[in-house]
Structure formats: structure tokens, C-alpha cells
Image (cartoon, helix red, strand yellow):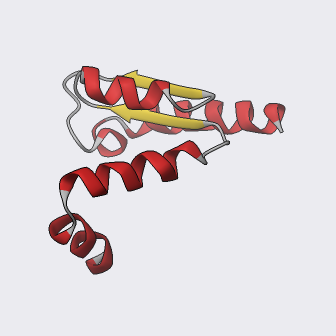
Amino acid sequence: MLGYWNQVLTTDPAELRAWIVEKAAGIRVPYLAVFGRPVTDGERERFDRLPDGQVEEWLGDGHFVHLVDSKRFATRLNAFVRYCEQAA
């Protein structure tokens, strides 16, 4: 955790963005992103660069979607795991 924040707090923003874009370009696995708020245009743009992603907005659930509606989250995560197993 400390290493992550050190990088975020001490790296030039343009350099940090370039590093993130480079690392993200190497992602070749399915991913699931669940937000408890609307996804911003910038976030959607970044997610669209990655193959095989599933992005959902559970409006009003805030940062802790897995705690606010744990049954819904577990059901969705289970469906995503099944999807990954079929894709493999």
C-alpha cells in the first residue's frame, strides 16, 4: 500500500498516466468493474481500451457495493467467474 501511494504522490501526473496506459495495454484477461456511482467519460474511455471488460453502475451503492448489497454482489461475481471459466 505504501509503495502504491508513494508512486501516486511523487510521480509527475503525465508520467504516471503514461505508466498506467502502458501497464493497462498488457491486460489480456476478462475483468469486471462494479461502480456504486455513474462511470465518468474518462473512466469509460480507459475501460474501452481493454478487451473483454464488463462495467456496471449500481447507482446509489457508493464505494462499498459488495457490502451494501452483498447478495447482489456475490451473485454477479459468481456469474462473472462462470463467464471466465467458459472463456478459458
39, 78: nearer the viewer: 39
Q: Is residue 34 visible?
A: yes
The quadrant in which the C terminus is found is top right
Camera-nearest residue between 31 and 8? 8
Q: Is residue 18 left or right of residue 77?
A: left
Quadrant the N terminus occupies:
bottom left
Depth check: give the residue in front, 75 or 47. 47
The percent position of residue 39, horizontal first and vertical second, equals 28, 24
Q: Quadrant of residue 72?
A: top left
- Residue at (29%, 56%) from the top-left corner? 16
Q: Position of residue 74 (x, y in %)?
A: 51, 39
Q: In the image, is 16 to the left or to the right of 10?
A: right
Mark yes or no: residue 39 visible: no
Give coordinates of residue 73: x percent, y percent.
45, 36
Task: Identify the residue at horizontal 27%, vertical 20% (top origin).
Answer: 41
Q: Is residue 60 above or below residue 2?
A: above
Residue at position x 44%, y 30% in the image: 47
Q: Position of residue 17 (x, y in %)?
A: 31, 49
Tell me which residue sits at (31%, 30%) in the image. 43
Q: How many marks?
A: 0
Res 57 quadrant in image: top left
Left/right placement of residue 22 relative to residue 17 reads: right
